[in-house]
Amino acid sequence: MELFTDKTIDKTRQGEAFSSEENNQHHFSRKFFIESYGCAMNFSDSEIIASILHSKGFGSTKIEEEADLIFLNTCSIREKAELTVRKRLTEFKKLKKKRPGLLVGVLGCMAERLKGKLLEEEKLVDIVVGPDAYRTLPNLIDEADSGTKAVNVLLSREETYADISPIRLNSNGVSAFVSIMRGCNNMCSFCVVPFTRGRERSRDLHSIVNECKELYNQGYKEVTLLGQNVDSYNWVDPNNGSEADFATLLENVAQISPSLRIRFSTSHPKDITDNVLFTMRKYDNICKYIHLPVQSGSTRVLQLMNRTYTREWYLAKVKRIKEIMPECAISSDIIAGFCTEEEKDHQDTLDIMRQSAYEFSYMFIYSERPGTLAAKSYNDDVDLETKKRRLAEIIEMQNKLSLESNIKDIGKTCEVLIEGNSKRSDAHWVGRNSQNKVVIFEKEPSKQFKKGDYAIVEITEYTQATLFGKVIR
Ligand code: SAM
Ligand code: SF4
């Protein structure tokens, strides 16, 4: 059981296939189909991959039957994510029989973790490419065309794809992801990311600001700056040796235009500085929302997880955020049933959730990942039933907290960036407020809006997941 409650890992987008506007403008001799799984970084990477493939004459398609190349951009974070991909691969067997030239490629974290083993285990796979090797994809396709299985899983200390202009795929035209750094140096004991995505490296500040400016000029109104650990962004200008940290980057992007909203994900609690918080406060267009994963509320478990903070330290950080920005929403990631977790530790997790009053959370059962410190050194000793029960209690707590937070919004006004028609009715708009809460409001003939506009809305009703309101202006 997993819960995804906001758009950074949108459950409804798992396995989404992409296609782009470019197809209407060019004629492509071969077509690729790409499906993405996992976190926002993977969806953003698929846009880089599409750009690389387009420049070599491949067009995208959303219809797998008409594809010459099928790619799955995969996730390894939990065992279940890998099983989903394995199952999906079996579905391409029939297609391969029908179309003998069809190539199937596995990209991303699962490719990096399993490397050549994937070719042995999944006979129908022709191409295996890790997250730092996408530039070599066209050559690997040539290799595979000639009948050789092609693999490139080299990790890099430099690759940031800074010069590649991503092709926005299935975009709503309002918000876009912009990757600002890759990899992770943190080595949390449960996590496979440092092994699949390599060392941390930050992208050239100017290329990030230029990409955001271009998006704004194309009509986008919101950018989400992406990285496993955005607060440790650190870019050294090779021309003069000057350093830019995350606060500097945020400020540079915020200054593009007051009507371009900025979000970011994810913040490791140990790295988010006062400087970042003050920069957030200074600019109205930097959304007042921080994803600050706690993982566990027990200091003993946090130590085993190698998170480098204690329960008290984390709570002090939450207090500091609220001191500087009382209106700031905070969300979290929580793992239920990590190695050695006892009932008391679990109660500490429920308590830290209550004290932090999270607006949303992503909540997971611990899943042992081969190669991690936890897999090597600790026993995965909490039985599945207990893990499930604890997760259910964590979800129940989050539901209660989300509801309490939404009740407090009644009567308040907020600025909503309109993302489009509400799914339930064309007579309503849906968008998000600065705190990343979904807001739905009725269209009124006297107030003409379009997608991408900002509306000031008074909140009149709520559910646990959504706010409803009336437009003021
Ligand atoms: N870099 C981000 C951070 O540290 O906050 C997290 C990135 S990770 C892709 C997203 C979340 O997956 C983590 O915060 C953690 O809660 C969860 N996760 C990672 N490894 C896991 C595992 N082995 N079992 C269950 N959940 C896991
Ligand atoms: Fe994984 Fe920890 Fe890095 Fe996040 S900070 S990606 S949880 S190792």
Image: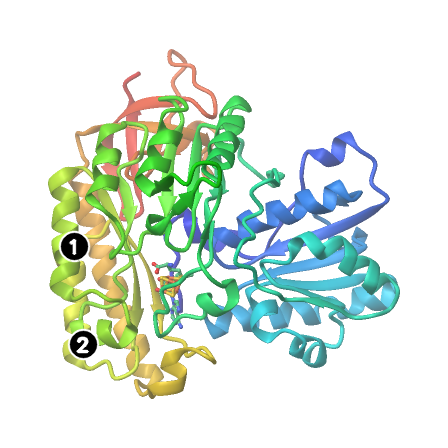
Instruction: Specify the label residue 467 is tagged with.
Output: none
Q: Does residue 436 appear anywhere in the picture?
A: no
- How far is disc 1 from disc 2 in space, using C-alphas? 19 Å
Instruction: Please state the horizontal and vertical placement of residue 175, each as a whole percent of the image.
Output: 47, 35
Quarter of the figure that contains the C terminus: top left
Q: Which residue is mark 2?
A: 300
Mark 2: amino acid: Arg
* Image-based side of 355 in relation to 201, left or right: left
Q: Residues within 10 Å of mark 2 (few under 14, many from 20)?
A: some
Q: Establish if 111 lies above or below 382.
A: above
Q: Establish if 162 lies above or below 454.
A: below
Q: In the image, what residue occupies the spot 28% across and 30% down?
A: 469
When asked about the image quadrant of residue 443, the answer is: top left
* Image-based side of 154 in relation to 9, left or right: right
Which circle's residue, 1 or 2, is located before the other in the chain? 2
Q: In the image, what residue occupies the spot 34% across and 29% down?
A: 416
Front residue (pair 406, 23):
23
Quarter of the figure that contains the N terminus: bottom left
Q: In the image, what residue occupies the spot 71% across and 34% down?
A: 22
Instruction: Please state the horizontal and vertical placement of residue 366, each as a whole percent of the image.
Output: 36, 75
Instruction: Please state the horizontal and vertical placement of residue 125, each as a whole percent of the image.
Output: 73, 70
Q: Establish if 243 lies above or below 286.
A: below
